[in-house]
Image: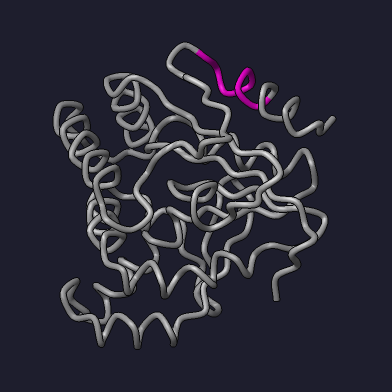
Amino acid sequence: MSDLSAPVLTLDGPSATGKGTVAAEVARDCGWGLLDSGALYRAFAYIADRKGVVVQDDVAIRRLGNELDLKCSLGPGGTAVILWGDVTLADEIRTESVAERASYYAERPCVREALLQQQRSNRRLPGLVADGRDMGTRVFPDAKVKIFLTAAPEVRARRRYNQLNEKGINASLAAIEEAMRARDQRDEQREIAPMKAAADAVVIDTTQLEILEVVTKVKALLLCP
């Protein structure tokens, strides 16, 4: 059950702006809960594919959404993990192919409705740090502090390329940037809950900022020591 009295910090923006890492750091430092909504959508896409559900099948999607019990928590590596029953989903939902599938699922109104209440159920005291693309505009419009992170596409692509290389995953820098730009366009232009900064959000460009600098800025806005 959610607690509407619990304060919420929302961190929205496109992929590889640092929001996942920043969200995890702030949640840990402030002792708050963590919601990585992107990971929820990735987990949904991953599970749907494993169960043979296709993107166009609204009935099967709604059924799957009603059956699933997905919880988000801060993993031992400092990143969000998704708990699917007694199964922990981590690296397997962080691939570019799963991200691509998740972006298509996120365009489906039935998927967004299926995951909306699961996201809101993470709101509990002492507080919640929620990162995604529509946290401040749709999921938690009453959030205490709203932040939108952005960065140059080529910088974001290089960050993702380096992340994948560190995990031993071969990738093409050009292909990553192309996929990111296409995903940004889909996220910004979808009918329901498009990716955009909330009217009352603070916009931070992370192109030339280190993670610690962004974390410091965010904690200052949140008044978290």
Q: Where's the C terminus, which quadrant?
A: top right
Image coords of residue 105 (percent x, y) = 27, 63
110 on left or right of 176:
right
Say which of 140 and 118 sits in front. Answer: 140
The structure residue drawn at horizontal position 52% and vertical position 22%, both measured from the top left corner, is: 204
Depicted 2 relative to depicted 161: above or below:
below
Say which of 77 and 10 sits in front. Answer: 10
Depicted 168 relative to depicted 192: above or below:
above
Residue range in magenta is: 209-215
The structure residue drawn at horizontal position 34% and vertical position 48%, both measured from the top left corner, is: 194
Residue 55 sits inside the magenta stretch: no
Image coords of residue 60 (percent x, y) = 26, 86
Q: Where's the N terminus, which quadrant?
A: bottom right
Say which of 102 and 108 sits in front. Answer: 108
Depicted 82 relative to depicted 47: above or below:
above
The structure residue drawn at horizontal position 56% and vertical position 34%, both measured from the top left corner, is: 201
**Colour approach in the figure:** one colour
Image coords of residue 9 (percent x, y) = 66, 44
